[in-house]
Image: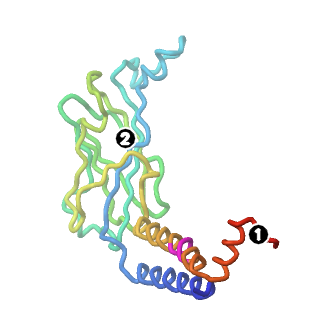
Amino acid sequence: MNIEFIIGTILTIFFGVLSFVQSIKTPPTRLIFVIEEVINLYADITRNISGIDISYKGENVRGNLFLIKAYVFCFGDKDITKNDITKSLYIELDNNAKWKDCKIIRKTTDLDVNVDLSEKKIIFNTDLFKNEDFFCFQSLCDIDENQLSISKIFTINHRIANIGKVNVIKSKEDIVPPYAAIIAWIVTIILVVFVFIPVKDIGNNEDYNFKKDYYLNGKFLG
């Protein structure tokens, strides 16, 4: 089989598949929540270094006050507008924890988001959440020291039209762009075809077999 034909076929398949993928609309809009950092302000900082005290509103920090840094991302084919929102995105704590504070520290340039805070709930209000918009917040939470996992003490939810359950993931690096896995599989298949078809073709070539016999019998002279 001609090598130019093989390469041409592979490139045709590859770019054909890419065109097909691009012609398909972006997946439905989804919200992604990522906890990037959880710091126990006493156990992780003040307890290990003598002479350092951290206070919050005039009181020294004890072992149950945590600083939480997290992100919220929006991906999809449809913007979330004010008319879609019956109940904004919120994070609600169980009975053994209380929110103390919450601030937006980073966000997409044009994103307007503000926070309503109570002891049990943080509500994130926005009139427009577009594809690839995000915001990052830091919050202080008073948590029962017996809690084994921060992620098990809260519920994150909303009532937004046509938006499913919030995806909670462990790391920003785990956010996979749409169709990335499909494209990776296609590239892998193409590489396998590229590697094995020429080998099979050469193995059936009479000239190759002739020279192989000379190699095996120690008679090949170059």
Q: Which residues are magenta?
A: 193-197
Where is 88 relative to 218, above or below?
Answer: above
Residue at numbered disc 1: 219
Q: Residues within 10 Å of mark 2 (few under 14, many from 20)?
A: many
Q: Residue at x 81, y 73 (%)?
A: 222
Mark 2 vs mark 1: in front = 1
Q: Residue at x 48, y 83 (%)?
A: 13
Secondary structure, mark 1, is loop
Q: Quadrant of residue 220?
A: bottom right
Q: Quadrant of residue 88?
A: bottom left
Seen from the viewer's position, the closer of residues 41 and 188 is: 188
Amino acid type for the residue under numbered disc 2: Cys
Identify the mark nearer the N-term, 2 or 1: 2
Where is 136 relative to 211, above or below?
Answer: above
Magenta stretch holds residue 161: no
Seen from the viewer's position, the closer of residues 22 and 6 is: 6
Secondary structure, mark 2, is strand
Q: Are marks 2 and 1 in contact (CB under 8 Å)?
A: no
